[in-house]
Image (tube, rainbow, N blue to C red):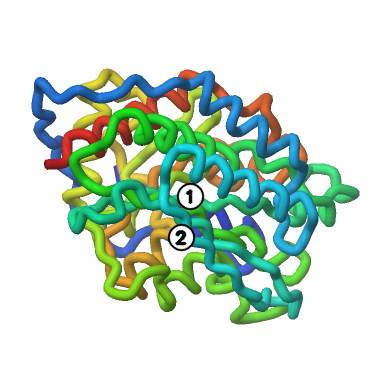
């Protein structure tokens, strides 16, 4: 199905310089991949991933330049080191669209850094500073909990890191937590023309121009964003098909082989500007986006998105299991 979809992202807001837009060209549909048998894949622990998300929420909103943001970042660094990763931290002051200077940190955990063949996994770890899609206008300048938008992808990656520490994969794995993804244009600042698209995903923009390691390369990347809600539906995302259709086929093929077809659906979603856009367009690494697509919600992501309702009530262990087990299976099938 060729969806008519708002040109939005984990970033873009309805009514803020965006409009309903039909894709000009229907992306090539991904073909199912062949999943090889006899590969031992660790069992993804959804309870563990859930606890990692809950830990983030308990720090409070992870808005750059705040104490809760700093403490949560320190928690990630300590966890990655506990799991035996080589950790690199990019500390940088990033200027937001409104002039705010953000004390940002991209946190990179490398497993088996000596291996040349690598896979990149990523998510953003900051949270939206303003609940500007909340039905209650009194909340429009309050920071939100960010359990699903930010927390879910990171929780899945922390559990994957825990598994990698016990059962090494055949390829090296880099887990990248991008910062300052969600500090983009406030809904009330729509009058600032030209500030919409590139005001988001500042951390991945910075990394794509200034990678953490000279000559860094990987086979491909997988971005996890908004992957925890009950009944999530992950459709083929437009930029993912454009730049990395073979990776889409591989991931969706494994998911369906594992029995997660109700989550990883055989449908086209929207073209979404997210962190993977800059990894593809600037850095040149094929990267896909696994992100919930809810065509029945006003914003395309779910009723909780960019509202004060984005809390642990919207985190479902069955969804976390489907995403985490799929990504683990993809990694461990790499030769």
Q: Name the residue under label 2.
A: 275
**280 left or right, relative to 151:** left
Determine which quarter of the picture holds residue 185: bottom right
Secondary structure state at the residue bearing disc 1:
strand
The alpha-carbon separation of the residues under discs 2 and 1 comes to 8 Å
Q: Name the residue under label 1.
A: 123
Crowding at dot 2, Cα within 10 Å, few <14 / some 14-19 / many 20+, comes out as: many
CB of mark 2 within 8 Å of CB of mark 1? yes
Crowding at dot 1, Cα within 10 Å, few <14 / some 14-19 / many 20+, comes out as: many
**227 left or right, relative to 56:** left
Look at the image and tell me whether residue 324 can be seen: yes
Residue 91 percent location from the top left of the image: 59, 69
Please name the residue shown 42% across and 38% down the image. 161
Along the line of sight, the residue nearer the viewer: 76 or 127: 76
Sequence-earlier tag: 2 or 1: 1
Look at the image and tell me whether residue 304 can be seen: no
**240 left or right, relative to 323:** left
**Residue 239, above or below 31:** below
**67 left or right, relative to 231:** right
Quadrant where the C terminus sits is top left
Of marks 2 and 1, the one in the foreground: 1
**Residue 44, above or below 197:** above
Residue 106 percent location from the top left of the image: 53, 61
Determine which quarter of the picture holds residue 16: bottom right
Residue 140 percent location from the top left of the image: 82, 53
Secondary structure state at the residue bearing disc 2:
helix
């Amino acid at each position: 199905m060729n969806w008519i979809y708002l040109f939005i992202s984990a970033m873009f807001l309805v009514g803020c310089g965006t409009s309903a837009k039909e894709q000009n060209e229907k992306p090539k549909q991904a073909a199912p991949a062949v999943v090889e048998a006899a590969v031992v894949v660790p069992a993804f622990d959804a309870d563990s991933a859930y606890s990692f998300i809950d830990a983030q929420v308990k720090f409070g909103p992870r808005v750059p330049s705040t104490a809760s943001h700093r403490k949560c970042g320190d928690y990630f660094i300590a966890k990655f080191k506990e799991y035996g990763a080589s950790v690199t931290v990019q500390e940088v002051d990033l200027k937001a669209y409104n002039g705010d200077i953000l004390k940002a940190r991209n946190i990179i955990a490398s497993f088996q850094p000596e291996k040349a063949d690598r896979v990149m996994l990523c998510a953003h770890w900051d949270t939206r500073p303003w609940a500007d899609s909340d039905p209650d206008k009194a909340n429009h300048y309050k920071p939100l909990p960010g359990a699903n938008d930010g927390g879910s992808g990171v929780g899945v990656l922390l559990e994957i890191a825990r598994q990698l520490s016990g059962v090494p994969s055949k390829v090296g794995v880099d887990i990248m937590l991008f910062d300052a993804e969600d500090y983009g244009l406030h809904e009330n600042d729509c009058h600032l023309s030209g500030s919409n698209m590139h005001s988001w995903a500042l951390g991945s923009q910075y990394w794509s121009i200034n990678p953490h390691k000279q000559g860094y390369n990987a086979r491909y990347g997988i971005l996890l964003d908004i992957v925890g809600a009950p009944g999530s539906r992950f459709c083929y995302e437009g930029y993912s098909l454009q730049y990395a259709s073979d990776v889409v086929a591989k991931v969706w093929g494994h998911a369906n082989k594992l029995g997660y077809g109700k989550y990883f659906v055989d449908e086209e979603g929207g073209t979404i500007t997210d962190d993977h856009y800059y990894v593809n367009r600037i850095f040149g690494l094929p990267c896909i986006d696994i992100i919930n697509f809810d065509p029945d919600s006003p914003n395309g992501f779910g009723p909780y998105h960019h509202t004060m309702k984005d809390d642990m009530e919207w985190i479902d262990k069955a969804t976390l299991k489907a995403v985490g087990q799929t990504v683990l299976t993809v990694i461990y099938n790499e030769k």
